Image (cartoon, rainbow, N blue to C red):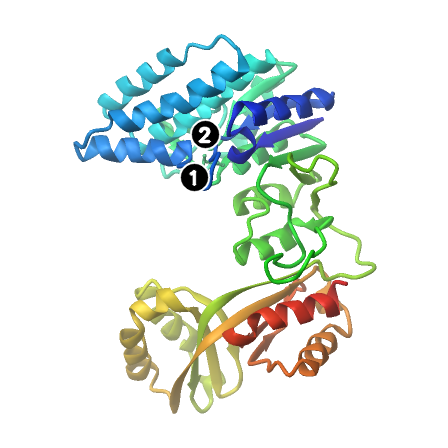
Amino acid sequence: MIVVKFSGSAVANAEKLKTAAKIINSETSCRYVVVSSPGKNLPDDIKITDMLYILHSKFQSREGYNEMLKKIAEQFMSIILELGITFDIDREIAILKEDLLAGESADYIASRGEFIMAKIFAKMLNWEFVDAAKIIFFDADGKLEDARTFATASEVLSKYEHAVIPGFYGSLPNGKIKTFPRGGGDITGAIIARAVKADLFEKCTANTNFFSADPSIVSEPKIIQTLTYSEALEINYTGIKIIHDEAAFLLKDTEIPTKVRNINTPSSEGTLITPTKDLTGNITVCIAGRRNFNIIHIEKFGINRFYGFGEKLFGIFARYNAPCEHCLSGIHKISVVVKTPMFDLKRNEILREIESIIQPDSLSLERDLSIILTIGEGTGRTYGILDKIASSLAHEKINIRMLDQGSDDLNVILGVSDKDYDAAIRTLYHAMIV
Ligand code: ASP
């Protein structure tokens, strides 16, 4: 049994919805579909979820909101007209307006994009519509009540041969709507897949395929054919979202794989994300990275014998809301990697506190650092990986400024100068992937 989730890009207009319907009708084992609200048609468009947030904030700040409401109605209206289905969109928009005037929350208003979209899709397919608020539950602190959610979703959905469920939200104990973080349609899809014990979760987008290196740097890189959830989470860190982090966490310890497909390239197999993988052949699946980091080097004789050192040091970053991205430690030295924009805002205060609380023998800052990850489960158990990295980069005269194999077996993280970033990605791709 397959649960299919369509991202906003794959339901942005009537034509895409027709493709989506074709995909569903060709998969006889697809019983449940999760949809996001319609995405952008053109790069400069505003997606419906964003329009709904704007609508809510305009109403709150007593600005005119009718224009925004009209735009939302128009996008849904054009979908319905082109699909040629009977659907009372005026009524849905009138309810949305009433709820807005009644002071409903931003979460509730934003959730109406998926709510209306799922109703339209259910009508188009002639399937049951099941409101996510009736099967996905949060506790009073906003934490997903997973056991109750899985049990209820499984029981409710088992009554229907086919159903469409809106993504992105569930309900709080007081019955009010709460949304997941942005992009949370994937989380709903993963919840439904787990609840109904699906054999496969399929995520359909119209955005892009997932490549083993950035296609704007490497010409025609390979599409990633298979990877594990843990590897996907590493790739997500670099900003390429294959699947939402929370969805990957929900599926990581199950038997359910996820297939990510681009509906614009139906002949391509897409990318399969699996809970585990066989460690044979080339284990590096992707070379990815990010620019713009700083490293703070803190030198102090005998750091290894200093009780509570970590607590004191990281406490400083915590107080200034500056996340430490990576940390490398030696016997008399510790180096902390931080992302430039966040750190820059509080740089002087953070360095001053390090001076006064840690009292280092020396403190220095290196700027313009890029972080590159060679990602692949089994990295820590495979010999020769560091050799490939070091020798290929040395051959191109690219200096490695930082190197961390980590203990999690998933990657090697290396730091190079920002100016060497593109060349390093290309070099590592050719040395480690093809
Ligand atoms: N519509 C929501 C968002 O834009 C959720 C999703 O698309 O998955 O974040």
Does label 1 or label 2 sit earlier along the sequence?
2
Residue 131 in view here: no
- Left or right: 79 with respect to 71? right
Q: Which mark is residue 137?
A: 2
Task: Name the kind of residue labelled 2 in the image.
Answer: Phe
**Label 2: element kind:** loop
Q: Quadrant of the C terminus?
A: bottom right
Vertical side of 100 occupied by 42: above or below: below
Mark 1 Cβ inside 8 Å of ligand 1: no
- Left or right: 406 with respect to 332? right
Position of residue 381 measured from the top left corner of the image (x, y, whole percent): 75, 68
Residue farthest left in this picture: 62
Q: Residue at x 53, y 33 (%)?
A: 188
Residue 266 in view here: yes
**Label 1: element kind:** loop
Res 164 quadrant in image: top right
Considering depth in this image, is 323 or 13 the residue closer to the camera?
13
Vertical side of 278 occupied by 68: above or below: above
- Label 1 environment density (alpha carbons within 10 Å; few <14, some 14–19, many ≥20): few
Mark 2 Cβ inside 8 Å of ligand 1: no
Q: Residue at x 28, y 80 (%)?
A: 352
Q: Identify residue for label 1.
A: 143
Q: Residue at x 57, y 14 (%)?
A: 124
Position of residue 60 measured from the top left corner of the image (x, y, whole percent): 21, 33
Task: Name the kind of residue labelled 1 in the image.
Answer: Lys
